[in-house]
Amino acid sequence: MTNKELSNGRAPSLLKLGACFIYDALIVIALSFAFAGLFLFIAGDATHGLKRYLLQFTLWFFIGIYFVWCWTKSGQTLAMKTWKLKLVDMDGALLELKMATLRYVAATFSLMLFGIGFLWAIVDPDRLYLHDRLLKNRITAVPRNTTS
């Protein structure tokens, strides 16, 4: 990505990216408690066997719905709104459903590989996560004088 391509929005600082990541993690924990409670209420004990894997998939799926919905509707999760960040494609447009879903899957693999895809932003000149670099997405800093 060139500086001209980033001209539609500034790259956020590593501090903002990290703070947003932590805030999003807290939201994921809260959603996990809510969805796990609902799952356990419906299905009962899920500490072993098929129910355990079904619970894990259910949590991953519903958390994915949260992220994909936020990215396609406004480009911002609750954490991104708080930290004035926005996820867009290379043209500055919101992600389409297919790209947002692909980003969620790629981000999942980034986390599974010891977070390497997220740590990539430390060495990336444009402060992009590895999955954003590969998928041609970017997180931009939203100017303070706009509402979204």
Image: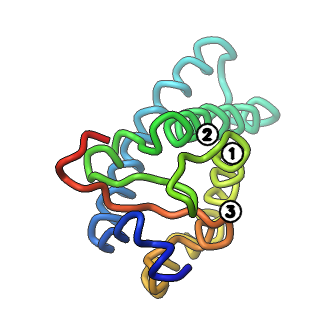
Instruction: State the residue at coordinates (53%, 50%).
Output: 93
What residue is rendered at 68% in x and 39% in y? 97
Please, what is the three-letter code of the amino acid marked with disc 2? Gly
Image coordinates of residue 24 in percent, x first then y, are: 40, 48
The image's mark for residue 101 is 1
| Relative side of 98 to 108, left or right | right
Q: Residue at x 59, y 66 (%)?
A: 132
Residue labelled with disc 3? 109
Most distant residue in the top direction: 42
Which residue was labeled with disc 2?
Answer: 64
Instruction: Kindly give the residue lying farthest to the left in the view shown.
Output: 145
Helix, strand or loop status at disc 1? helix
- x then y, percent, for residue 11: 37, 71
- Give residue 81's quadrant in the image: top left
Q: Earlier in the sequence, mark 3 or mark 1?
A: 1
Residues 9 and 84: in front is: 9
Q: Quadrant of the image for the C terminus?
A: top left
Label 1, label 2: how many angstroms apart (C-alpha)?
8 Å
**Placement of 98 over or under 111, stated as above or below:** above
Distance from disc 3 to disc 1, alpha carbons, whole Å, reads 13 Å
